[in-house]
Amino acid sequence: TVPLFRAAGKKNSFNLLGLTEAELKEQFVRGDGPGGQATNKTSNCVVLKHIPSGIVVKCHQTRSVEQNRKIAREILQEKVDLFYKGEDSDVFKEKKTSEKKKQEKKRRAKENLERKKHFKEMLQLDRK
């Protein structure tokens, strides 16, 4: 099973629960990580909290506060959708199908590797 909150971050979901600005608490803080002076002196990291559910999202993907606000809202909307809908959420279903595709791709790659190994063994036996 896929953990619910790890599934958030997918962009193709359209049937998400809506958020109102009254439900959100927004803060701007200094970001962390690499970036030196640009990171340490500017407060362009956005922290969004959805008050009814208590879900908190921190976004510091770009230098722009406006872009970070937009990205944080998208991520929060997906997490809130997952929180309330659970496995019925489009985000969860999308993540589950991508996991299945990934597993299928791994399985096919492993089979191809085994075939190649078997083929090489057959060639070596023919040479002897």
Image (cartoon, rainbow, N blue to C red):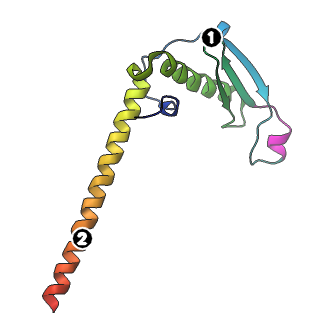
Q: Residue at x 71, y 15 (%)?
A: 25
Q: Quadrant of the N terminus?
A: top left
Mark 2 closeness class: few <14, some 14–19, many ≥20 residues within 10 Å: few
Q: Residue at x 84, y 45 (%)?
A: 37
Q: Residue furthest left?
A: 126
Quadrant of the image occupied by residue 87: top left
Marker disc for residue 35: none
Read off the magenta span. 37-44
Which amino acid does the dot numbered 1 rest on?
Answer: Pro
Q: Is residue 35 above or below residue 47?
A: below
Which amino acid does the dot numbered 2 rest on?
Answer: Lys
Q: Is residue 44 above or below residue 18?
A: below
Q: Residue furthest front?
A: 1
Q: Is residue 34 above or below residue 6?
A: below
Q: Quadrant of the C terminus?
A: bottom left
In the image, residue 92 lies at what x, y percent?
A: 42, 27
Relative side of 111 to 67, left or right:
left
The residue where tag 1 is placed is: 52
Relative side of 72 to 119, left or right:
right
Which one is in front in this view, the residue at disc 2 or the one at disc 1? 1
Residue 123 covered by magenta stretch: no
Mark 1 closeness class: few <14, some 14–19, many ≥20 residues within 10 Å: few
Q: Secondary structure at mark 1?
A: loop
Relative side of 75 to 88, left or right:
right
In the image, residue 62 lies at what x, y percent?
A: 68, 37
Q: Residue furthest top?
A: 22
Marker disc for residue 116: 2
Q: Residue at x 25, y 73 (%)?
A: 117
